[in-house]
Image (tube, rainbow, N blue to C red):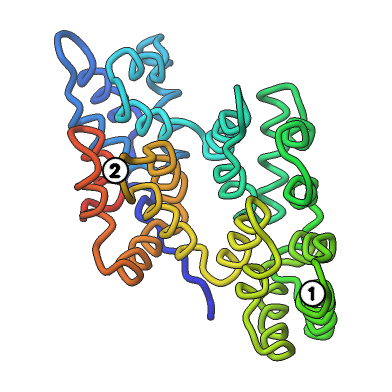
Amino acid sequence: MVYTPIPTVVPVSPFDAAADSQTLRAAMKGFGTNEEEIINILTTRSNAQRQQIKSKYEAEFDRDLIDDLKSELGGKFEDVIIGLMTPLVEYLCQHLHNAMAGMGTDEDTLTEILCTKSNEEMHAIVKAYENKYGRPLAEQMCSETSGHYRRLLTLIVTGVRDAAGTVDPGRAKEAAAELYAAGEAKLGTDEEVFNRIMAHSSFDQLSLVFEEYKQLSGQTIEQAIKHEMDDELHDAMMALVECVQSPAAYFANRLYKAMDGMGTDDTTLIRIVVSRSEIDLGTIKDEFERIYNRTLSSAITSETSGDYKHALIALLGGV
């Protein structure tokens, strides 16, 4: 099945960065802030257009748009708007850094960001991370994770995955046999084999491998992973499988978990809505409704409020 990514945010046309910067300045000048104007502009422009607005704003008013937004906004609403104003790769780097800062490590965030990327995207993140934080991502990650999970993420980060679209049906058969021999066919599990195949093959190739695996073993790769692995490695492997089959279903599940039960994981909710809005948030929205039989906007509406809610709903396309 061919994956069709549908964004909810596309470049606006006609576009006038100077007019937008004037409107934003007026919305923040004087007493009170016109949050509605800020939402209307920033949720309906592409990231590239927002960067142009930022440049125009600085040239026109000799002020930093980000600083002005931060001084006028607050809380989760500010997090959404500043996220929108940050170039995507830099935004993901910030979230990776935060996931590893301080005590403990947020493995779920590491898995979500790293296991869902193509090699090309991974190279951009690795480069940007070192530029921003002065330390290689792989090095920092190694000090924050352990065991087979660390080995899997290290392979992904070092960019060993074949280029998108690389497929070899014969090799897929061999890889399926190797996975079977490393898992179900033996006592214990040879995680190294799973790591190598899952981190090296392109997503298109993995799709073939999973089909061959089912032919060979009579059960799905998910069933095998469930039997053979646990903890972070299990979650990372499942994330890879879901992203090979349907990235939208993976992110729909992540959004559901972020809003399920007591309290809301706002950081995850904001990150997915902001970072996927120009990629496949429309597809994620459809999957969410298909899987959970309720709209994503109704779920977000019941978990959020005020300008924070309005900004997220606007990014969903207003429905």
Q: Residue at x 25, y 61 (%)?
A: 295
The residue singled out by tag 1 in the image is 179
User: Where is residue 111 shown, x and y percent of the image?
Assistant: 61, 49
User: Where is residue 61 shown, x and y percent of the image?
Assistant: 35, 11
In the structure shown, which secondary structural element does the residue marked by tag 2 occupy? helix
Q: In the displayed structure, does residue 180 sit left or right of residue 114? A: right
Name the amino acid, label 1: Leu
**Residue 229 figure quarter:** bottom right
**Residue 168 figure quarter:** bottom right
Extreme-front residue of the structure: 187
Are the residues tagged 1 and 2 within 8 Å (C-beta)? no
Q: Residue at x 33, y 19 (%)?
A: 69
Q: In the displayed structure, does residue 209 sit left or right of residue 238? A: right
User: Where is residue 95 shown, x and y percent of the image?
Assistant: 54, 34
In the structure shown, which secondary structural element does the residue marked by tag 1 occupy? helix
Distance of label 1 from label 2 (alpha carbons): 41 Å
Q: Nearer the viewer, mark 1 or mark 2?
A: 1
Q: In what quadrant of the picture does the C terminus appear?
A: bottom left
Q: In the displayed structure, does residue 96 sit left or right of residue 134? A: left
Q: Residue at x 81, y 55 (%)?
A: 160
Viewer-proximal residue among 140 and 29 = 140
The numbered mark, 1 or 2, whose residue comes first in the sequence reads 1
Viewer-proximal residue among 227 and 97 = 227
Q: Residue at x 70, y 52 (%)?
A: 120
Number of marks drawn: 2
Q: Is residue 307 above or below residue 43?
A: above
Q: Residues within 10 Å of mark 2 (few under 14, many from 20)?
A: many
User: Where is residue 148 shown, x and y percent of the image?
Assistant: 78, 51
Give the number of the disc on residue 312.
2
Name the amino acid, label 2: Leu
